[in-house]
Amino acid sequence: MINFNNSIWSARDPDNILLTTPDSINENCFGFGKSIHPREDLLQFTNLNNEKIIDFGFYGDEIELNGKWIVFVVISGNPDAWYNPLERYEFKEFIDGVGKVQELLNKYT
């Protein structure tokens, strides 16, 4: 679903989103007991060369799925990174957030 160079980026992907195809994503994929459990720490890439982090997660009610998908770009080790990110994007749809993650991976590679 997301293409990246693993010699430049380290990925943390507890739900195996990277193995999911866009065609298989629908409203039945999300929630407790589903293949993708929306939460803040959903998917994160760390650039091994410059310590930039691209973080993708869900913010809101994880049970009712009432919230938003957010993509952050921050610098690792900066104590204010999450309060003052380099970039921040909000999306209503999961797949739109995935597209932004791909765009940012390309931008910062």
Image (tube, grey):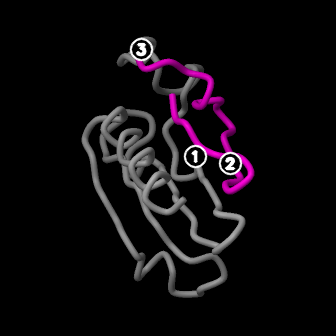
Residue at x 41%, y 39% (from the top left corner): 98
**Main SS category, magenta section:** loop
Q: Which residue is tagged 3? A: 28
Classify mark 3: helix, strand or loop: helix
- How crowded is the residue under tag 2: few (<14 C-alpha within 10 Å), some, or many (20+)? some
Return the x and y of residue 108 as percentages of the image width and height: 49, 63
Residue at x 67%, y 54% (from the top left corner): 9
- The image quadrant that residue 79 belongs to is bottom right
- How crowded is the residue under tag 1: few (<14 C-alpha within 10 Å), some, or many (20+)? many
Residues drawn in magenta: 1-22
- How crowded is the residue under tag 3: few (<14 C-alpha within 10 Å), some, or many (20+)? few
Looking at the image, is mark 1 or mark 3 earlier in the sequence?
A: 3
Residue at x 68%, y 48% (from the top left corner): 11
Amino acid type of the residue that numbered disc 3 sits on in the rendered structure: Asn
C-alpha gap between disc 2 and disc 1: 7 Å
In this picture, residue 93 sits left or right of residue 35: left
Location of the C terminus by quadrant is bottom right
Q: Does the residue at mark 2 contact the one at mark 3 (Cβ under 8 Å)?
A: no
C-alpha gap between disc 1 and disc 3: 19 Å
Q: Which circle marks residue 3 in the picture?
A: none
Q: Which residue is tagged 1? A: 43
- Indicate yes or no whether the magenta region holds residue 4: yes
Return the x and y of residue 17 as percentages of the image width and height: 58, 30
Residue situated in front as seen by the camera: 49 or 45: 49
- Indicate yes or no whether the magenta region holds residue 106: no
Q: Which residue is tagged 2? A: 11
Camera-nearest label, 1 or 3: 1
Amino acid type of the residue that numbered disc 2 sits on in the rendered structure: Ala
Return the x and y of residue 51 as percentages of the image width and height: 65, 73
Classify mark 1: helix, strand or loop: strand
- Up-down relation of residue 63 to residue 40 (above or below): above
